[in-house]
Amino acid sequence: MKICVVGGGLSGLVSALNLAGTDQVDLFERRPIAGGCLGSYRIGDYWIEEYYHHCFAGDARLLALFDTLQVADQLEWLRGSTGYYVDGIIHPLTSPTEILRYPHLTLTEKARLGLLTLRSRRFDVAALDAITAKEFILDTLGPGIYSSFFEPLLKSKFGDRRDEVSAAWLISRIAIRSDRGAGGERLGYLRGGFQYLIARLCEEVERQGARVMLDSPVREIRRDGDGWLVDGKAYDAVISTLPPQVTAGIAGIDIAPVPYQGAACMTLALDRDVTDGIYWLNMKDAAPYGAVVSHTNFAPLAWYGEHIVYLASYFAGRFPEDYGQRMLADFCRRFSVSEEEIHWHRLAVDPYAGPVYTTGLGARLPAYEEHGLFLAGMFSPPNYPERSMNGSVIAGEEVAKRVLARYPDG
Ligand SMILES: Cc1cc2nc3c(=O)[nH]c(=O)nc-3n(C[C@H](O)[C@H](O)[C@H](O)COP(=O)(O)OP(=O)(O)OC[C@H]3O[C@@H](n4cnc5c(N)ncnc54)[C@H](O)[C@@H]3O)c2cc1C
């Protein structure tokens, strides 16, 4: 059987890995590099992700993939500390003492927040899909905690669409992040970066006979008898890992759209730390980025020889051309950094960086097969109510199983 996989991110590569031994697989990736959202820059002698990444102890399928590809020996469990930037001041918020000292919540509000965190794993996430995160927090914790704590987080993550986001998303985020000791969350990272995983995936997929074609955007998918023509080439089955509405456009079929947002992420390097040792600094003050993620306050500085910082932001609609400059200028002014101190900077922009988890989305996700076309990606059920590397690994595995079940004789 000839199978075409569209997209060389985790979902596409994992589906190709699961089919390559039994079928003839061609994978098409639009960009000159594989990895999709998990793509990396090569800087001197190291790799660094275009978008900050870490994994969690509960990411069972991702961790199993590390074993399969023999990259597990590169996995390090590191501590990720957090903080909040309010009125020009950095507030560490990792240890119980730091949380107690935080001046922008009352003691009662902190206690309520702590209780919600403890209860977060016990909620029925499906039932929370119908309620907005805003309604849920206002009802359970009150307006003070909403405006001083959750609204800035929702705003930095979903911008103007924050009021439409479901409580299912919020509670699952709190639950996943509730596993923290006094020194911070235990988060996984690969020595050598997640590029190590992507490179091993490509190597293994190709070793099993599949072709990974970079710089190869797919422009058209058409029905051809029982099979498909992908840019004129015949295949028995096609797996698309692109957003449903993009697949619908190039395949000329009707698939319900999933609301998406874009991400713009500035990565830069300098000689010193500017976030007081904090890994993840959320911005409450208005800035052209919602968080400052100091990668080298998480992964050891010695791996890179310079401090690496991400300025993280999400956007809807058209991305403003001068946005990168605005991010950089704001960062330099706010953190008293001169432009000469910045060794290098790169801006990554992806208009389809992840779904916006609006209420009711759980019931509207596309199936793994629509009109005979196979679909897997950030919009698949394992990536609800938050997309992740683990979710995309499962989606890739699941869609491969469905292809094999549909064509049992190969
Ligand atoms: C800012 C950010 C931070 C994140 N942080 C984390 C984290 O810390 N932990 C975690 O677990 N997850 C994180 N994620 C999520 C994780 O990166 C994704 O869930 C996962 O990588 C998505 O993989 P995918 O293959 O499903 O989609 P994608 O990575 O989007 O892959 C789709 C691929 O299709 C390609 N493509 C598009 N159009 C075409 C075309 N016409 N023809 C051919 N190819 C095409 C794209 O170039 C891309 O490579 C983060 C994501 C972002 C954006």
Image (cartoon, rainbow, N blue to C red):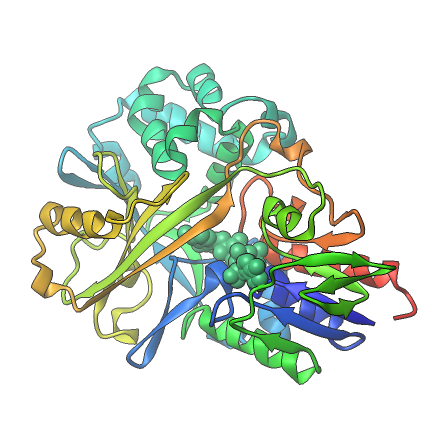
Q: Which residue is drawn at 28% across and 79% down?
A: 44
Q: Is residue 99 visible?
A: yes
Task: Residue 373: give x, y in percent of width and height.
Answer: 76, 53
Q: Residue at x 64, y 25 (%)?
A: 127
Relative to 207, residue 155 above or below: above
For the residue pair 46 and 408, the one nearer the viewer reads as 408
Location of residue 207 (image quadrant): bottom right
In the displayed structure, does residue 299 sit left or right of residue 394?
A: left
In the displayed structure, does residue 235 sit left or right of residue 255?
A: right
Task: Residue 326: give x, y in percent of width and height.
Answer: 19, 47
Location of residue 345 (image quadrant): bottom left
Task: Residue 269: give x, y in percent of width and height.
Answer: 21, 65
Relative to 28, residue 211 above or below: below
Q: Which residue is drawn at 16% across and 54% down?
A: 274
Q: Residue at x 31, y 18 (%)?
A: 144
For the residue pair 128 and 175, the one nearer the viewer reads as 128
For the residue pair 114 and 229, the one nearer the viewer reads as 229
In the displayed structure, does residue 146 sit left or right of residue 209?
A: left
If the image is split into quadrants, where does the C terminus sit? bottom right
Q: Is residue 15 visible?
A: no
If the image is split into quadrants, where does the N terminus sit? bottom right
Q: Which residue lies furthest to the right in this view?
A: 409
Task: Residue 362: give x, y in percent of width and height.
Answer: 64, 34
Relative to 52, residue 300 above or below: below
In the displayed structure, does residue 2 sit left or right of residue 316?
A: right
Count of marks overlaid on the render: 0
